[in-house]
Image (cartoon, helix red, strand yellow):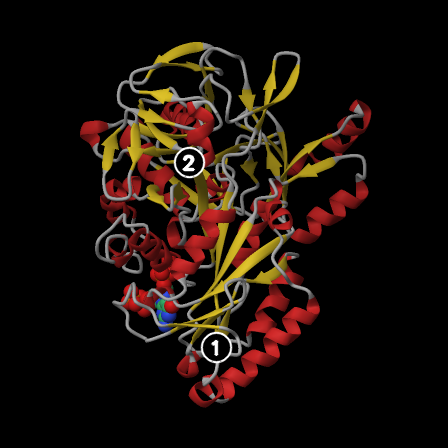
Amino acid sequence: MSAVAEQAARRRTFAIISHPDAGKTTLTEKLLLFGGAIQLAGTVKGRKASRHATSDWMALEQQRGISVTTSVMQFPYNGKIVNLLDTPGHEDFSEDTYRTLTAVDSALMVIDAAKGVEARTIKLMEVCRLRDTPIVTFVNKCDREGRPPLELLDEIEKVLGLHCAPITWPLGMGRAFKGVYHLLEDRFYLYSGDKHRVSEIETIAGLRAPGLTERFGEVYKVLLDEIELLQMAGTGFDLDAYRAARLTPVFFGSAINNFGVRELLDGFTEWAPPPQPRNALVPGGARAVQPTEAAFSGFVFKIQANMDPKHRDRVAFLRVCSGVYRKGMLLHSVRLNAPVRIANALTFMASERETIEEAYPGDIIGLHNHGTIAIGDSFSEGEALRFTGIPNFAPELFRRVVLKDPLKAKQLNKGLDQLSEEGATQVYRPLANNDIILGAVGVLQFDVVQYRLKDEYGVDAVFEPVPVHTARWVSCDDARKLKEFIDKNEQRLARDHYGDLVYLASSAVNLSMTQERHPDVRFLDTKEHG
Ligand code: G4P
């Protein structure tokens, strides 16, 4: 096996999807703790501390330095190299959150045992489904009164369309939580409620080991019934079904109490797929780029501006798809058709930001630049390959830009062009008037754009509400029908930064009626870059 193949096979690159407050931050911290990446729980928390405090951009700006470092966390575990990509949540939820999911090979879904499948999780699952990303599930907060586990599994199956294969099963819940039973190991892991305990957990082998009824009473009886039901329903784990994103292995635990996390991490690192081939357009066609290929390639899925005026650069996050990145190497920007020397790419160890020597498929590197890199850019050693599958997502929030000083229109346009190429916002120019409409997935994106327009381009702009509910990219193979559609709907049509046609629906009903009236027109909620 080549060195690249060997290194690629060790990588596990994933992200956590969850609804706010389900426990993503806590679980991240515990994964790092069990991965030996941090000595004491608490490192990730720092970032969260000011989370509720404000949605004030300046305060967020101060956290930027930290959030760059926690954007990607790498640690070794059981002979594997784990890359955990942070998905911005809470008020920093943005299109980056979606795009990050296009850069991973699998995902971990965290569900609050009391709340079940929540709205944000459903949304993030839709993004995972675009690439059939395999999902491992962690049902968190079992130390609190939760919903019956069978009901939770049922909800995952119904709402998310994923078969569930429980790997661990809770012995009681809430105050009666006594631990979990590991179905594959046929072993109980017992819960002590000790937050600081990471090892020396008491275990008992055997579902029907002697003394369990005496010790646990009713909750044990319930568990036996439930396990029997599960076995009858045939919910065994199947690696192929998991890898094909049809089935999710489910673990139960309590992240805050370090409970159930090690079992989760063990299962995850064993089953999660290594870097997968990625599709790319090449001159005259398309091909799958294999991670084991010797030549380096990768794509940019996120760009973060450095808010420090002394270092006004941006960090582009590139996922390595094939080959090896070596410090100082010349990378070929496929979009610019030009070489770009990257002097000091960053790698992201869980504890600190470091300059790296090498990176392999599945790894993420951070490229400093001054605006020469755009979202979706592909890099190679010279081959003209353009990775696909890093789309723009239809925004859910819209604002009209109003310029305070009309003489600044040129700077405004320049700023918006740049910011849309960095993925900070999407820009729409209506066909019927001279408005500029911004689209975003998270509300903070508007704050960022407003701040950066002023700070970097000297443009004072205010953003006003606008009666747009959602956007769809439209296309039609029949030119005559397309023209007819445009003529009829000019008032609701716009062009995006790349000149593509977008329908700005005033409501969900408006969208579905327009779709019905124009069955030959495609309405898409994602669009490939470029
Ligand atoms: P998020 O990143 O998904 O938004 O969730 P986060 O980890 O911040 O957790 C949300 C809240 O749930 C936190 O409480 C956290 O302590 C709590 N939590 C996480 N895991 C568990 C668990 O296994 N059991 C219980 N009982 N609680 C859990 P908070 O009050 O918002 O913050 P804090 O003051 O405790 O830090």
Q: Front-most of 212 and 422? A: 212
Callout 2: CB less than 8 Å from ligand 1: no
Callout 1: CB less than 8 Å from ligand 1: no
Task: Check residue 8 in the rendering and tell me which mark sits there, or answer none.
Answer: none
Label 2 and label 1: CA atoms lie apart by 46 Å
Quadrant location of the C terminus in the rendered image: top right
Mark closer to the observer (2, 1):
1
Q: Front-most of 314 and 433? A: 314
Q: Residue at x 66, y 52 (%)?
A: 508
The quadrant holding residue 448 is: top left
Secondary element at image label 2 = loop
Q: Front-most of 401 and 88? A: 88
Check disc 1: other Cα within 10 Å, few if <14, some if 14-19, many if 20+: many
Q: Residue at x 57, y 69 (%)?
A: 152
Q: Identify whether 214 is placed above or below 282.
A: below
Check disc 2: other Cα within 10 Å, few if <14, some if 14-19, many if 20+: many
| Residue 168: % across, % down | 50, 66
Q: Front-most of 415 and 375? A: 375
Left or right of 449? Residue 39 is left
Asked whether residue 468 appears in the rendered view, the answer is: no
Badge 1 amino acid: Leu
Q: Residue furthest left?
A: 310
Asked whether residue 481 appears in the rendered view, the answer is: yes
Secondary element at image label 1 = strand
Left or right of 195? Residue 483 is right
> Can you tell me which quadrant of the image ligand 1 is in?
bottom left
Q: Identify whether 317 is placed above or below 42.
A: above
Q: Which residue is mark 1?
A: 171
Left or right of 16? Residue 509 is right
Badge 2 amino acid: Ala
Task: Check residue 424 in the rendering and tell me which mark sits there, or answer none.
Answer: 2
